[in-house]
Image (cartoon, rainbow, N blue to C red):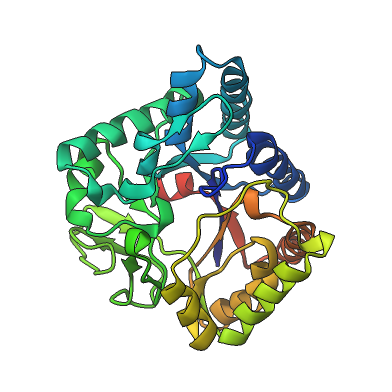
Amino acid sequence: MNIYITLDYELFFGNSGTPEKCIIEPTERLISIVDKFNFKCVFFVDSGYLIKLRKYSQQYPKLENDYKAVSNQIKKLSDKGHDVQLHIHPHWEDTVYDGNQWNFDTTRYRLDSFSENEIIDIFGRYKGILEEITGKQVFAYRAGGWCIQPFSKLKKAFKEYNINVDSTVFYKGKNTTKTQWFDFTEAKDEDYWNFEDNPCISDKKGSFLELPIASYKVSPWFFWRFALTKKIGRAIHTSIGDGISSRASKQQIMRLLTRSSYSVVSIDGYKIRFLNKAFKKYKNQRKDNFVIIGHPKAFTEYSLLKLNNFLKILNSCNDHNVKIFKNINE
């Protein structure tokens, strides 16, 4: 089985937190773990943040230093053989820095809030800054907040900028939050598929490849324990990142707390608790791919310890390969 360790490299979008604690430090902690086993990761970089850092860098020396620190880390990751790919949170288009903090306007959180031509422009600028930093082609995409629908508005941008791999969809995934909705219930429980107009629907002649994030069915009890763990606030379960997430809708929270649901297989905080169970399930089903997702900002001492133990097990097996998306393109 092929294992892909994928990370959404970004700040928080409630209170952003600092790049030092949300990006730089937890990413370095992650790399110190994967280096022990010579594994490589895929980093989906929220490059709208880089665009804004560069815009404000002449006005604010602190942001100039932030840009240098973040872009240097991205270049270092790429030079060491990790994949750097495109992650878009388009509300950066409406975000301003007031001299002390980022003020987020999430009215246009979803790309479909923009015109088709505006989306093409966003893809060009956001992809371009990553290729400028790494010197390598960007060909894969993950939608911010999983908001890839309707894909019809993104298709021209994918074609224009040679984005041929997507890794956004996860089996039975659904979010009812008004500004962050997505619905992947049409997607089949398959390892990968080609698609053309809908990333959830297989099309053998499709121009694009969907490599879905692994998913796992969890009971409401899991989220009750998750909430309790955060409330108790033990140090081992405290995020390294120093920001605050944007809030989910009350409807979405109640759905998670009252009904079984499907979640991405994650290495974030307490969610890493079901990583081993999900892996065994995929292995027993003889799946070809196991795509793990993580967010450095949400790492905890607990999740990093569990990740280290998981990778140690992988390293001792001969029937699993940790890969990056570059291997797919080749």
- State which quarter of the image contains the N terminus: bottom right
Q: Is residue 220 above or below residue 271?
A: below
Q: Position of residue 47 (x, y in %)?
A: 45, 35
Q: Residue furthest top?
A: 58
At horizontal 74% and vertical 51% (from top left) the residue drawn is 37
Which quadrant holds residue 283? Answer: bottom right
Q: Is residue 116 above or below residue 236?
A: above
At horizontal 76% and vertical 63% (from top left) the residue drawn is 237
Task: From the viewer's side, name the closer residue of 226 and 30.
Answer: 226
**Is residue 307 among the parts visible in the rendering?**
yes
Task: From the viewer's side, name the closer residue of 255 and 20.
Answer: 255
At horizontal 55% and vertical 16% (from top left) the residue drawn is 60
Residue 263 horizontal side relative to residue 195, left or right: right
- State which quarter of the image contains the C terminus: top left
At horizontal 60% and vertical 59% (from top left) the residue drawn is 321
Residue 95 horizontal side relative to residue 98, left or right: left
Which quadrant holds residue 117? Answer: top left
Q: Position of residue 204 (x, y in %)?
A: 21, 65
**Is residue 215 among the parts visible in the rendering?**
no
Q: Position of residue 233 (x, y in %)?
A: 78, 64
Q: Position of residue 144 (x, y in %)?
A: 41, 51
